[in-house]
Amino acid sequence: MSSAPAKQAATGLLGARALLVATCALSLMLFLPDAAGARAQAETCPATPTLDAMVHALDAAVSGPGTKDWTCMKQLFLPDARLVPLVVAQDGTATPNPVTVDQYIDRAKGRGAQSIQETQLSYKYELYGHVAQVFSTYEITLSGKLVSRGINSIQAIFDGKQWKVIEIVWDKETPENPIPKKYLP
């Protein structure tokens, strides 16, 4: 035998619990990534079953505004991959400046909406089993204007389905260090 105040308290408690559950569910929907959305996003990344596909996917992943979605870039690399631009001093001393993929992306985000386009002009590769070395000549344009060229040395591993990058080392072209004709198209 319950009294009216006890029934009201129980009803109020149930209502508060329902409100709490609804609020938590709404928060999860707003702040956690949607699994179907994440799958759809991942499906837009190109497959890399060949080295040619990997090279073209890298161009697409690096190109664009700094504000773009960098999911595909991350998927092209192994988790511990490194990107290593060489910094060449006035005296010609080259110093590697290794960064993780996330550090590279953070730097790229710094350019904001400014968009670059990287294109491989030519590339050659050596292949043995599941290991590849790709030597590629690239150019980078900004608003259609050439801003730099150089050579990438890309090390990649085939996991049985896809080529994944483990490291890219690159050196920019300079007047003192022009790209040899054998590496140009």
Image (cartoon, rainbow, N blue to C red):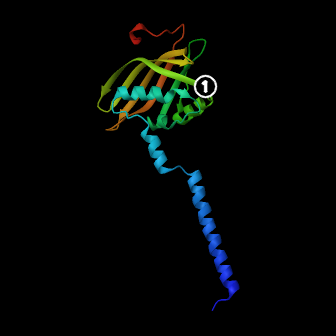
Crowding near the residue tagged with mark 1, few <14, some 14–19, many ≥20 C-alpha atoms within 10 Å = some
> Looking at this view, is 30 or 51 the one in front?
30
Location of residue 150 in the rendering, given as x and y in whole percent from the top left corner: 49, 16
Q: How many marks?
A: 1
Q: Quadrant of the C terminus?
A: top left
Seen from this angle, which residue lies furthest bottom? 1
Q: Which residue is mark 1?
A: 114
Asked whether residue 21 is in view, the answer is yes
Q: Quadrant of the N terminus?
A: bottom right
Asked whether residue 146 is in view, the answer is no
Q: Is residue 53 above or below residue 79?
A: above
Is residue 92 found left or right of 161 in the rendered image? right
Location of residue 152 in the rendering, given as x and y in whole percent from the top left corner: 45, 21
Question: Which residue shows up at 45% across the image and 37% down it?
Answer: 75
Question: Which residue shows up at 38% across the image and 35% down it?
Answer: 47
Quarter of the rendering containing residue 153: top left
Q: Secondary structure at mark 1?
A: loop
Location of residue 114 in the rendering, given as x and y in whole percent from the top left corner: 60, 25
Q: Is residue 16 above or below residue 88?
A: below
> Looking at this view, is 133 or 69 the one in front?
69
Seen from this angle, which residue lies furthest right? 5
Tell me the amino acid under the disc marked 1. Answer: Gln
Seen from this angle, which residue lies furthest front? 4
